[in-house]
Image (tube, coloured by chain):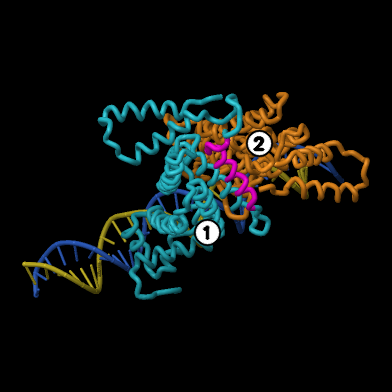
Chain colours: A cyan, B orange, C yellow, D blue
Amino acid sequence: MSFDGQLPPKTRLLRAAAELLANSAGGVVSTRQITQRAGVTAPTLYHHFGDKEGLFDAVVAAGFEEYVAGDRDFAPSGQPLEDIRRMWDNHVQFGLNQPELYLVMFGNIRPESRPAVVADAEGLMEEMLNKAAVAGHLNVPPREAARSILAANVGVTLMLITEKAPERNLELSTMTRDAMIFAVSSEQAKDNGPEASGKSSVVVAAIALNAALQASHSDQLSSSELKLFLEWLHRISTSSTS
Amino acid sequence: MSFDGQLPPKTRLLRAAAELLANSAGGVVSTRQITQRAGVTAPTLYHHFGDKEGLFDAVVAAGFEEYVAGDRDFAPSGQPLEDIRRMWDNHVQFGLNQPELYLVMFGNIRPESRPAVVADAEGLMEEMLNKAAVAGHLNVPPREAARSILAANVGVTLMLITEKAPERNLELSTMTRDAMIFAVSSEQAKDNGPEASGKSSVVVAAIALNAALQASHSDQLSSSELKLFLEWLHRISTSSTS
DNA sequence: CTAGCACCTATAGCAACGCTATATGAAGTG
DNA sequence: CACTTCATATAGCGTTGCTATAGGTGCTAG
């Protein structure tokens, strides 16, 4: 009844689902609402998307494109850690701009089942942290750093979403963001004593070398040698100093 | 059919709901399952709990008691920040031990509606951080610190829950935990220059004084004077130095 | 002892849900 | 034209959360 343009039913279903989701105010969106708005009947939905979850997965995939676009826009700054900061802010802003979509993407948690979108976002952040590691700015292996930062990022965004818009305090985000980035940064140890919480310089160097090796496809070592070498590096990188 | 002891129907409903939830593997638990297991019919449920959400709220309240009990057990150590560390670990452990219950408590997010359990958990953490502030260990007002730490704590726990149990890496938790505690701690600035990221000692002192005042009910100032004084302290405490 | 009154529970059923067995139409191919 | 293939519609199944109505139970008052 709302828009019966000449678009194919598959597209209309996607749009109807996205629009209804955006205005759902947290409530449930039914397949009957979606199909009625799209001007089709139930079997059309199941023909194209399998089931309701399949349709929402498609909506999430489209939403993720938008999310990634926000990241790629201002990616290439000189300092990788500054880009991480922007990725964090982009993440929070995306969540606050489209809370319902965000909740479907990052809030629909079920035990022992990791949504694909989380893995993708983690990959994006790890990629960026890899550059920081190559430059020797990282205190921790990029994968662990990415997981840790993303977990905090999601937690902060979820908490901000639960607050009513007028009283949202974005300082919660910036403070947590800087705390996490500082924690994985090698700069924290620059003028502390050897017993301080920062990792030693050899660990930082090992992490940087590890990231550089995995990026450069160097063939100075045979594949089996490289494998063992990387394993040692990993052991050094993850050795705890406390 | 399972247990029709002489317990009152209300208790049986609560137990049935909790047990079914714990074994639901993320799936939906229906009121018919619950009432059948409890040996009662539908109207009994709605008489005692209003609706399905009311029943789950009651289950959550019981679960929160258990959660708090874990906190209170080893609360009184000398160092408040060490207790925060334990609260964090207790939170994560609770989430991993009872993932379904945890998801109902902290994962059922809806926009602009803050679950009571989140506010309670935040209050608990703020209370503990208040002691740290009185002792001059805090770099940030206790409320903001509590919100930030809890947000990261929830984010980490949710991320760990999505991972399959055998490959859960608890270092993600400890690393994020220490990063957050370090960020709100006044110790981070101990041997940095004045332009470093740490707050100045006057801010730390202001925060400590603020917390001490609110705890001691001192009557050296009139209520109106005290109100203004606290407002100034708050302004100092939240002043950014970067 | 009984009448009345809360309180609690059961019978039966409604509207809405996700989903599907089956049938019908449209489009392309021999 | 006959035939297949893809896409959509009709109608309905089983289940969901929830409730209008009525019946039973135990208490206190007269």
Answer left or right for B73 relative to A4.
Answer: right
Answer left or right for A9 relative to B22.
Answer: left
Chain for disc number 1: A
Whole-percent x, y for residue B145 in the image: 67, 41
Q: Amino acid at mark 1?
A: Gln
> Does the magenta run of residues contain B225?
no
Q: Is residue B157 visible?
A: no
Total marks placed: 2
Mark carried by residue B192: 2
Which residue is denoted by mark 1 in the rendering?
A: A98
Front-most of residues B227 and A49: B227
Q: Is residue A93 visible?
A: yes
Residue at (71%, 43%) from the top-left corner?
B143
Magenta part of the protein: which range?
A170-188
Rendered image quadrant of residue B55: top right
> Does the magenta run of residues contain A178?
yes
Figure check: B21 above or below B114: above
Give the main secondary structure of the magenta stretch. helix
Front-most of residues D15 and D28: D15
Whole-percent x, y for residue B102 in the image: 56, 38
